[in-house]
Amino acid sequence: MEGIFKQIDKIKPLYDMTYKVMLFICKLLLVADILITSIAVACRYIPFVTAPAWCEEIVLTLMAYMAVLSAALAIRRGAHIRMTALDSYLPKVVIKALDILNDIFVFGLALVMITVGWKYALKLGSMGSYTSVPFLSRFWLYFPIPVAGVAMVVFEIEAFYNHIKSIVIKEENK
């Protein structure tokens, strides 16, 4: 059975690549967010320069991207907030079952994010544009939701695989 897992483990670079791409995008968004915010704040104190009208809307959009993409990244690292106060009192099997149940619910949430987020991006996004940037569709405001949903699905598939692998290999070693 371990041979099957060794074959499937060859896909791990795909998960690593997805994680690195999402992390890189988050870093770029953070840098852009800091630069735009710095420009807006500096323009408040420079009397002869006015801040561009689009700063606030673009910063909020970039923050929306960073929020949902970084949440997807936290899934892979297992860094989400979780209740662990009772873990020392529960049997390991129960904790493992609760972790799997948690992953099932997060996977479901990811599917909802993809389907509903895509519908919102297409329908609500096509209905308007940014107030201060009229040529830019509101599609881009809703687009991070389905993108993060796809990343969450990828990372949850990896989590399910890791759960199955830990259960099967532990049982084989008994």
Image (cartoon, rainbow, N blue to C red):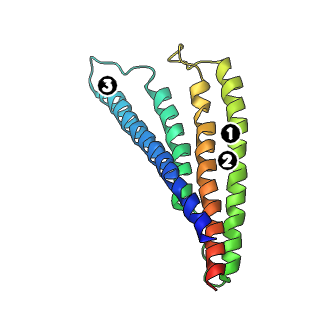
In 3D space, how far apart are the residues under numbered discs 2 and 3 (Cα atoms)? 40 Å
Quadrant in which residue 136 is drawn: top right
The residue lying toward the viewer, choosing from 4 and 68, is 4
Type of the residue with mark 1? Ile
Q: Secondary structure at mark 3?
A: helix
How many C-alpha atoms fall within 10 Å of the one at disc 2: few (<14), some, or many (≥20)? Answer: many
Q: Are marks 3 and 1 in contact (CB under 8 Å)?
A: no
In 3D space, how far apart are the residues under numbered discs 2 and 1 (Cα atoms)? 6 Å
Task: Say the numbered circle drawn on residue 114.
Answer: 1
Query: Which residue is at 50% across, 27% downward?
Result: 57
Quadrant in which residue 167 is drawn: bottom right
Type of the residue with mark 3? Cys
Of mark 3 and mark 1, the one earlier in the sequence is 3
Can residue 83 be seen in the rendering of this structure?
A: no
Task: Say the numbered circle drawn on residue 43.
Answer: 3
Between disc 2 and disc 3, the foreground one is 2
Q: Is residue 120 left or right of residue 63?
A: right
- Could you say where residue 127 lies in the image, as x and y percent from the top left? 68, 18
- Could you say where residue 6 lies in the image, as x and y percent from the top left? 55, 64
Question: Vertical placement of 134 versus 2: above or below?
Answer: above
How many C-alpha atoms fall within 10 Å of the one at disc 1: few (<14), some, or many (≥20)? Answer: many
- Could you say where residue 157 lies in the image, as x and y percent from the top left? 64, 55
Of mark 2 and mark 3, the one earlier in the sequence is 3
Question: Vertical placement of 62 versus 7: above or below?
Answer: above
Query: Which residue is at 61% across, 64% downward?
Result: 4
Residue of label 2: 110
Can residue 143 be seen in the rendering of this structure?
A: yes
